[in-house]
Amino acid sequence: MGEADVAPETIETENLVLTRSVDSRDKPMLTDRIMRGGPTEFTRWSGFVVPDMGAGVVGEELDRFTFESDNDKNVCYSIFPKCSGDMVGYVSLVATVDEFGLASYLGLPVGREYTEIEWFIFKEARGRGFAEEAVGTVLAGFFGGKLLEGSGCTVTAMVGSRDAENLEAASRLGFRDPLATGWPEPDDDDGDEPHDPIGVLRMLTLEGVEFERAEARLCSA
């Protein structure tokens, strides 16, 4: 089944409209918010720590980034609150093969395809529940077979160990950290490196049955 058959152009939730991302419309907004947020915001988006926004890696990463895909294993939605209509971030699904043996390291089945979910909420829009609502909606579509083909698949998410807001949202949606507390924190005390706002990236995992249980808990809360 191809992407055009399973990924709708628009998905509405109680508070949001998720619209298939288009580079010409959405990438300038993403670039503007990251550049205005400075090194900390760039690190939250990319995972790379940079000393200042003049570093070449900033422009290179933003130039290379694209919302769009030429295959049926990737879908990205830009997030628009109904109350304002302004883009506040995005959420994407990317089917990927475990090239680095992380599955075995995390105690997961080896030799299968995983799907990674990624999301980013602009600084001024955080703390309003947009991440949880948007990510939960996309996960429901994925595991329900309406976005890509998610039946029986494992979803992974990379979230920084210091990113309390996204860790909490991921936990409420059913994600777990297979390595629990086995992630050392970076040392920022030497003063030579810029502060790392995200810490160590944790690879969280989610199965369909865990998501169903999380949804049930959220509905009954």
Image: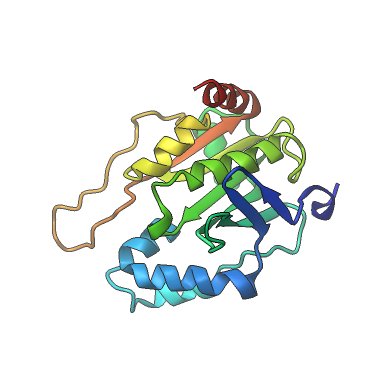
The answer to whether 69 appears left or right of 169 in the picture is right
Q: Quadrant of residue 219?
A: top right
Task: Write the residue at 35% across / 76% down.
Answer: 55
Task: Write the residue at 49% across / 34% down.
Answer: 105
Viewer-proximal residue among 188 and 119: 119
The answer to whether 193 appears left or right of 101 in the picture is left
Q: Quadrant of residue 124?
A: bottom left
Task: Write the residue at 34% across / 50% down.
Answer: 198
- Residue 125 lies, with reference to residue 52, above or below; the image says above
Viewer-proximal residue among 10 and 54: 10
Task: Write the residue at 66% across / 36% down.
Answer: 140
Residue 48 image point, x, y percent: 38, 61
- Residue 184 lies, with reference to residue 61, above or below; the image says above
The answer to whether 40 appears left or right of 176 in the picture is left
Q: Residue furthest left?
A: 190
Residue 194 visible here: yes
Residue 169 image point, x, y percent: 45, 38
Report the coloring of the rendering: rainbow
Residue 141 image point, x, y percent: 70, 40
Residue 59 image point, x, y percent: 45, 76
